[in-house]
Image (cartoon, rainbow, N blue to C red):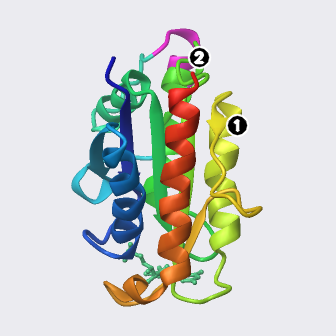
Amino acid sequence: MTIRVVAINGSPRKNGNTQLMLDAAVETMKSDGIDVEHISLAEHDIRPCDGCERCNKEPWACPIEDDAAKILKKMVAADGILMGSPVYFGGVTAQMKALFDRSAMPYKEMELKDKVGGALSCGGGAHGGQELTIWQIVTFFTMHDMIVANSSGGLYGAMGVGNDRGDVRNDLEGLKSARNLGKRMVELLKSR
Ligand SMILES: Cc1cc2nc3c(=O)[nH]c(=O)nc-3n(C[C@H](O)[C@H](O)[C@H](O)COP(=O)(O)O)c2cc1C
């Protein structure tokens, strides 16, 4: 049976450093036969949750007409979810946080439960908040009762350094951590 992963890029800048890190993790997964679909939040309209609580009464009953439900349904249909965000003021981008909040739609019935999650981040500074950003994504996975993939070596995700588009290519350790994350996701996905 085909194992499917969605790789979500939370950056509003297309084809930047986060994408390069996602590509490194995805390459590892694809070489192991995993089917991967890329989703760039820069190409989608995801508006913030307005707290109406309608989806808390009836799953998926969100009155906001945008792309959130479409992306969340792809996450529900996948076996694994890889999420990457650049560091924006020490945390995930507004686009990714909006998607987290809108995931109240599948949360009602815990539809993301037991999926394998992998987190990565890239920041302009070497100590720019990559760890906090990853931690935010891991918290999202944990709240959904997902299984968190480690990158190996005591990390709980992959972290890169790079500011201008493409800079992360020079961060060999960061790209290696992304490949290791992909490898661990494959192990967990195949053990399910
Ligand atoms: C609004 C904004 C806030 C940022 N905040 C941080 C930060 O807190 N720490 C950091 O290391 N880099 C920060 N950066 C730099 C980005 O994380 C960095 O350029 C990253 O490589 C962008 O990834 P992308 O190419 O995938 O968009 C910020 C960039 C922007 C535009």
The spot of residue 97 in percent (x, y) is 53, 52
Position in image of residue 41 (x %, y %): 32, 54
Horizontal and vertical percent position of residue 27: 33, 56
Which quadrant does the C terminus fall into?
Answer: top right
Please indicate, yes or no, whether residue 79 appears anywhere in the rendered image.
Answer: yes
Disc 2 residue lies near ligand 1 with CB under 8 A: no
SS at circle 1 = helix
Q: Is residue 124 left or right of residue 138?
A: left
Residue at 28%, 48% (x, y): give it.
38
Q: CA distance from mark 2 to mark 1?
A: 15 Å
Q: Position of residue 16 (x, y in %)?
A: 31, 75
Picture residue at 58% right of the left edge, 34% below the top: 188
Mark 2 Cα-neighbour bin, 10 Å: few <14, some 14–19, many ≥20: some
Could you tell which of marks 2 and 1 lies nearer the N-terminus? 2
* Residue found 34% across the figure and 66% down from its top: 19
Residue 161 lies, with reference to residue 117, above or below; the image says below
Report the residue marked by disc 2.
108
Q: Is residue 79 above or below residue 171?
A: above
Q: Tag 1: Cα neighbours inside 10 Å, few (<14), some, or many (≥20)?
A: some
Depth order, front residue of 192/127? 192
Which three-letter amino acid code belongs to the residue tagged 2?
A: Lys
- Is residue 51 rendered magenta in the image? no
Query: In the visual, does 148 lie left or right of 112?
Result: right
User: Mark 1 = which residue?
Assistant: 142
Q: Nearer the viewer, mark 2 or mark 1?
A: 1
Q: Quadrant of the N terminus?
A: top left
Q: What segment carries the magenta color?
A: 53-59
Q: Amino acid at mark 1?
A: Thr
Q: Is residue 93 visible?
A: no
